[in-house]
Image (spheres, rainbow, N blue to C red):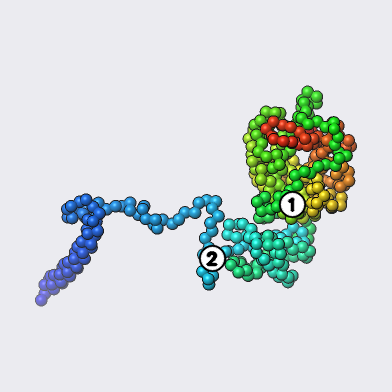
Amino acid sequence: MDSKGKRIGILLVLCTLLLAMAAVALVNYNKLVGHGSGTVANNSTNSNPKQIIEEDGKVHGADLSAFMRDNDFFDVEVPKGSNQTTYDEMNENGETVRNLTLLASSVERDIRVKIVDDNGETVIGQPFSVEVADTGVYIDEDKDGIIRISDIKPGEYKVSLEEQPGFKVPAAPVSVRVRSMVSYTVIDDIEYFVHSEAEVDILKEDTKEKKIDSEDEDDTQYTALLDVEEEQGNAVQLGIDVSKWNGEIDWEVVKAEGVDFAIIRCGYRGSSSGWLIEDPFFYRNLTEAKKVGIKVGLYFFTQATNQVEAVEEASMVVTLLGETTLDYPVFIDTEGAGGNGRADNLDAATRTAVVNAFCQTIQNAGLDAGVYASRNWYLNNLYVEEMNAPNIWLAEYRQTPLYEGRYDMWQYTSSGAVAGIEGRVDLNISYLGVN
């Protein structure tokens, strides 16, 4: 056979193979179509099965949106803000295991540890314990999710969270540098140490009636907004200071009454527990007052017993404020908590150090700072000459203050009345010359 004949033979063999493959494919295709036709026919009104398969290969009459009615087709979407957390691990009993994160920081010769879950929430009600390498083991005895370790030598430390049933602890320890001296800068993780009032016993932590010394008030005090524009020109402004105790305020009415500024409480340190607690009306008061054009400042009711706690309090203020701008200073309120507060009996030197630490931290954050106290408090519980506060806010309830020192704001009554606010309200005059 010549080469031409060979080529023809090979071509015939290839054609035979291709025909065989095509026949097999056709048989399988008909079986597939037959199966599909039976399924579609049961759900279609088309009586001609030959028209079920269109020229483009699509099945005529098919319900292409059926997947929309399949409850298991889509993943369940968790709404934003939901507290639902997905845990990937189970223990031997088939129970979910919560993942934990350990936070550690230092202000001065201390280590502050906080245990949080996947939602960033503090885990309470558990007797957690942490080990500080080469130092010892420390237990969260009050089960509040926070462990404070004091009197630690400066240096680098490794902190590990010990095993706790029902939880997965971090595999690696966290590092923390213990400082030798207070750094008057905002603590980065302070937000994890701030509590809401839902977490505390308000009656123990926040004393409503904080009265100044009887020597600092008399019956001649004014109880209404003063007509200062006629008497003293534009050198002063009229204001109020408010907190949750004043309830919901109609700020538009307050503005119409002639109020120029408001000093708003953003939070306080618990008189009993020492926790940092946000005033539940802070954000509403801040935003609503600014919205109507009232100038704003802030105050924080302190129960700090040392400089470290003062830095914590100032850090909380700065963190809560965020990017919001202020017109007036941030004041530290040093009045007592009825004699039962954890800081009520501090000596004047310690209290002065607390005030200075607070103000310095506020100023280092780029804000103006000040101190609030009554005349008697300034004279007997602080060393005014050693204070580094740039602004002094005096509380003295009479027509003319007896205080002989410098002051930039004067709270002249706690029994004021202003439309838009139910009940009594503190009234103030400012000499700060804020435009």
Judged from this view, the residue extending furthest toward the top is 230
Q: Which numbered disc covers residue 214?
A: none
Position of 253 relative to 177 (above/below): above
Of tags 2 and 1, which is closer to the observer? 1
Along the viewing direction, whichever of 216 and 393 lies nearer the viewer:
216
Distance, label 2 to label 1, CA atoms, is 36 Å
Does the rendering let one see residue 364? no
Q: Could you tell me residue 240's position as x and y percent?
A: 74, 35
Q: Amino acid at mark 1?
A: Lys
Position of 343 relative to 140 (above/below): above
Instruction: Kindly identify the residue that appears in the image at 69 percent across and 53 percent down.
Output: 200
Instruction: Kindly identify the residue that appears in the image at 60 percent across and 63 percent down.
Output: 100
Q: Amino acid at mark 2?
A: Thr
Identify the residue under disc 2.
96
Q: Quadrant of residue 286?
A: top right
**Figure quadrant of the N terminus:** bottom left
Q: Which numbered disc covers residue 204?
A: 1
Number of other residues with Cα within 10 Å of mark 1, as a class: few under 14, some 14 to 19, many 20 or more: few
Instruction: Kindly identify the residue that appears in the image at 77 percent across and 59 percent down.
Output: 108
